[in-house]
Amino acid sequence: MRVVIADDAVLLREGLVRLLTEHGHEVVAVVGDGEALVEAVVAHRPDVSIVDVRMPPSHTDEGLRAAVRARHLVPRSPVLVLSQYVEVSYADDLLATTGGAGGGGVGYLLKDRVAAIDEFLDALRRVAAGGTVLDPEVVGQLFARRRRDDPLRELTPREREVLGLMAEGRSNTAIARTLVVSDGAVEKHVRNIFTKLNLPPDTEQHRRVLAVLTYLRN
């Protein structure tokens, strides 16, 4: 594979060059900042880029933002991001680039995984082939965050069922017939749904629309 490496840590950078070269891969560019990464991807069209999340000048998400920009300029350009810690928002941003015309392989691994050489090289090959590779710790934290952020998490199974029927456009009476419960029971469930979703007091029809939109987005 033809590889671009972007990392401002010289030791890790040189270690990656040696590792990849010893396993028959060609390192076509080694850079230390985001702008140079973009230029290298455009110039060399590598099979895959290995990118540190935090690079100069900001040392925050410079590497990731550069990788996203490079993928915009060179559609479907595979990128494997390395990070010292699990940074869930960065992982979300990276995964968002896999949709639409961007496509292409993406990976997000903790730097510690590089020490497991066979696993690291396998992850690199899978990303280059268009796959998605996520560190197990990243997966765990993504799920945990989504559970915390899920506005439907407080709903009971019955309330979710009622909301699903609301999304089909059914009236309270129709929902009651479907679930074989009283109209009053459905009205209570609907009020609970509005309360748990923190929908502002308004006309019931408006709140029903907002509730259904929340359901469809999750």
Image (spheres, grey):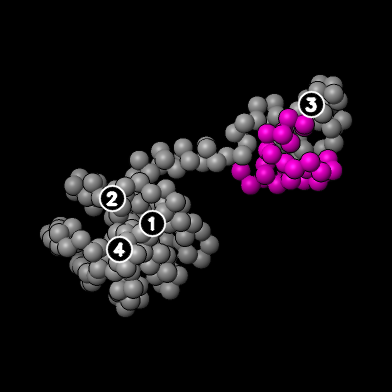
Q: Which residue is mark 3?
A: 188
Magenta highlight: main SS:
helix
Amino acid type, mark 4: Met
Q: Position of residue 209 (x, y in %)?
A: 77, 46
Q: Is residue 36 left or right of residue 183?
A: left
Label annotation for residue 106: 1
> As displayed, is residue 61 above or below residue 33?
above
In this rendering, the count of numbered labels is 4
Label 3 packing within 10 angstroms: few (<14), some (14-19), many (20+): few
Quadrant for residue 130, please give it: bottom left
123 part of magenta stretch: no
Mark nearer the N terminus (3 vs 1): 1
Marks 3, 1: nearer the viewer: 3
Label annotation for residue 84: 2
Residue 4 appears in the picture as rendered: no
Q: Is residue 26 left or right of residue 186?
A: left
Marks 1, 2: nearer the viewer: 2
- Identity of the residue drawn at 40% across and 38% down: 140
